[in-house]
Amino acid sequence: MAYHSSFANSKFRIGNMALLPIRTRYSGPAPTETSTENEDIIDEAIKYFRPNIFFRNYDIKHDADRTMIYLTLYITECLRRLQKCQSRVQAQKELSALAISTFPIPGDADFPLNGMFVKPANSEVEKMKQYLEQLRKECSDRMVDRVIDPETDKPSKWWLCFVRRRFMDKSLLNIGSL
């Protein structure tokens, strides 16, 4: 059975995706989590990435699971980029570029998860873009810290072994564009 988000009681949503507090230095619509000892949704997605990546099906129990699904797919894209990196500096540049690159949001024709996500209302479209970009930037920073071995300055093989795996047989980006 797949791991689900523990943030079931989210007060805020955009479309049908939970707008959760995160520890971040990037501005955006997500509330800021100030406690360093509490896990946020990004920590949770990274922690459960390795067991969840093996699942082809994922039952959505609440809106926070949709945020977790998006982050899991984004982590997969981060790992694809990190496998080509030879240093921490190169990894930071690569993932920073990935985080701010143009990306589809729910409701767009090329968004791979339109069956699970609801298109945000017209008044929420910009907020959704900002929220996803904020998640992507923070997740990118944490993936560099987690995957790049400080001793060798190279990506960890224990993370890169998951590059070829596809969560729910989906990808956020067109594989041919990488």
Image (cartoon, rainbow, N blue to C red):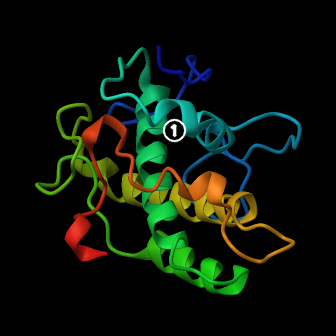
Residue 174 point in image, percent of width and height? 22, 64
Q: How many numbered tags mark residues here?
A: 1
**How many residues crowd mark 1 within 10 Å: few (<14), some (14–19), many (20+)?**
many
Residue 62 point in image, percent of width and height? 44, 18
Task: Pick the quarter of the image with the C terminus.
Answer: bottom left
Q: Is residue 148 above or below residue 109?
A: below
Image position of 103 (left or right of 34): left
Q: Is residue 147 above or below residue 9?
A: below
Image position of 20 (left or right of 68): right
Who's the residue at 30% across and 35% down the image? Answer: 168
What residue is pinned by disc 1?
A: 19
Residue 111 point in image, percent of width and height? 21, 52
Residue 59 position by quadrant = top left
Residue 13 point in image, percent of width and height? 44, 33
Residue 144 position by quadrant = bottom right
Image position of 126 (left or right of 150): left
Who's the residue at 55% across and 58% down the image? Answer: 160
Who's the residue at 25% across and 47% down the image? Answer: 106
The amino acid marked with disc number 1 is Leu
